[in-house]
Each structure stands twice: as C-alpha cells, then as structure tokens.
Image: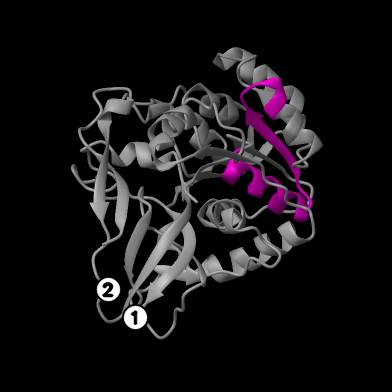
Amino acid sequence: MTANQQITLDNRPQGEAVESNFKLVQGTVPALQDGQVLVRHHYLSLDPYMRGRMNDAKSYAAPQPLGEVMQGGTVGEVVDSRHPKYQAGDKVVGMGGWQEYSVVDGNAPGALRKVDTTHVPLSYYLGAVGMPGVTAWYGLVKIINPKAGETVVVSAATGAVGSAFAALAKARGCRVVGIAGGPDKCRYATEELGFDACIDYREHPDLKSMARALKEACPDGIDGYFENVGGYIFDAVLLRTNAFARVALCGMIAGYDGQPLPLANPALILVNRLKIEGFIVSEHMEVWGEALAELAGLVAAGKLRPRETISEGLASAPSAFLGLLKGKNFGKQLVKLV
C-alpha cells in the first residue's frame, strides 16, 4: 500500500491559531473501487477561509471535523483510475485536502476537473485561474458591476483574489485602488498588477489616517469595494463611498480569531444607499466556466501576472498557513508537495 502523509485538525484554536492545532499523521492509500480516481497532489492551496472553519461556530460552511484531514484545494496528476473519464497522467484540480494523495469519486459533480497546462501553469489553477480568481470575478462582475471610469477598491490587494480583481477591473476601464501591507507589496501592485494606486495599511493603522489616504487615492470617491478584511479599513472605505456604491463582502480576515467586528458608522449604508452583498463563490458554479475563460485569457495575454509564495513539503503547511493569516505571503500561498 502507498504511504500517504496527512495533516489533520487535532484541536480547535482558543483565540489565535497555532501550529499545535494541527497534527502530521501517516496514512495509507486505500485500493481503488470502480469509479474512483487516485490523484497525487503537486500543490496544496492555503486560503484565509480555512481559519474560520477551524472554529466550531455557525458559519456558511460546516466546521472542519476534528481528527480528519484539513480540507483545501489541490492540483495534481492522476496516477491510477477506475473511471473512464480520467487516465493516468491527466492534470486535475480538486479539493484533495492537506495530504499527498487523495481518492476521488469521479462521478461526484465538481469533485475533479481536468485542466490544460499548455499556456497556464498548473499552480495557477489554485489561484488566478481557480477559486480565488473566480471569487474576484463574481464580486466584481455580478455585485459591483462597474461602469468604465468608476473607482473600485480592493483590500488584500496583492493576494490571489486581489491580483485577479485588478486585471478584471482594468479590463473594464475602472480606476483601481488597492490596500496592502508594506511598500514592496504596494510597489508590486502598481508596477506589475496594474493598480492605479495602492495604500500601505501599515502606514495608516487607524481609521482617521486610512480615511485620509483613501481620500487622496480616490478623489472622485469610491463606487465599488471588494472586502476581504473588515475592521477599521472597512469603516474608512465606507466614509469615502459615493451614492449607490456597491460592496462585495467576501472575507473578514481581521475577525477570524473570533472577536466581533462592529461597524463604526452603519448609518452610511442608508445615507449613501449602499448595496452590500456577502457571497460564497462555491454557491455560484454557473459562472465558473465564463469566469475561468476570461481569467485564463488574461494570463495568456500577460495582463495577469500573479505572484506565488511556495513552501516546500506537507509538514510546512501549518506554519505557512499561520504566516498567511498575518500577511507574510506575497501573492498566492501554496505548498509544493512534488
């Protein structure tokens, strides 16, 4: 039997997540049944949403079960198949979790998807041309729905979602402003990702300072905002929104350790007649084909050049994940397994 290293959730965080919440275990790969596919993972995706699922609390998704393999996106290669649709050597993307191998039901809708690596690197299917890219597409196109010339803002601007958001918004003729942590990330945002301006939140660590920076970067106000963070940054953006601005609410990473994130001035929602809509991209599978086609086209044309931070080996996943939550990554955070 093939050995299969795995990382499970051993215990739930008490406040901030720590490495001891996870456990590295040695498993084995079971024999394939009819209809099943064996995938060897090449890359594992680390994403902020995983932190919320570590809590045993009501949310949009069931909590990560204790003692089971941490759930998450993977790309890899089919090494054995008992399903006619998949052959050994196929490159695939799925939700194989924090482990070296996964056995997948080839008949389960959306469980596994073959991908073409001719023009798009395999790892990109976990970022720019994967779930994060589609997340950016849905929030921009279906919720913010910008007109050419409007100003749109995104927090966590240089991550996998933010970088795709910039390319998609520029393609629609928008002024695009990012919020990121540190001068290197802000320089990357403007010089490589196409942002018109980028605000370093580390230089603006409170509401008053951030509001001033947004006023300078967005002289015509803000028409659309893609929210990944919450907290005082959200409050500062709301102060600069124009009438009938739209907010796509996708993440609240500032509150993932469990503390509530109250709004400082919710009356602005009424004053500016804002549309605020939360969404989970996996509930909108009908748009994935259209979104992935546009994202792959932007990559192939050189208009979307995402950066990746890659840690080596499955055992590095917990520390890389905790670093992601503190903004230590530069672009999409991945774990390389092969």
Three-letter amino acid code of the residue under disc 2: Leu
Quadrant including the N terminus: bottom left
Q: Is residue 200 visible?
A: yes
Three-letter amino acid code of the residue under disc 1: Arg
Label drawn at residue 82: 1
Front residue of 301 and 22: 22
Question: Could you tell me which residue is drawn at 64 percent across and 65 percent down?
Answer: 117
Number of numbered discs: 2
Residue that badge 2 annotates:
32
Q: Residues within 10 Å of mark 1 (few under 14, many from 20)?
A: some
Residue 255 in the figure: left or right of residue 305: left
Image spot of residue 155 (x, y percent): 58, 34
Residue 27 in the figure: left or right of residue 18: left
Residue 17 in the figure: left or right of residue 141: left
Tag 2 secondary structure: loop
Q: Is residue 60 visible?
A: no
Question: Could you tell me which residue is drawn at 23 percent across and 23 percent down?
Answer: 14
**Vertical arrangement, residue 142 with respect to residue 22, above or below:** below
Which residues lie in the magenta part? 159-185
Question: Mark 1 near mark 2, Cβ–Cβ under 8 Å?
Answer: yes
Instruction: Determine the CA span between mark 1 and mark 2.
Output: 7 Å
Say if the magenta span includes residue 99: no
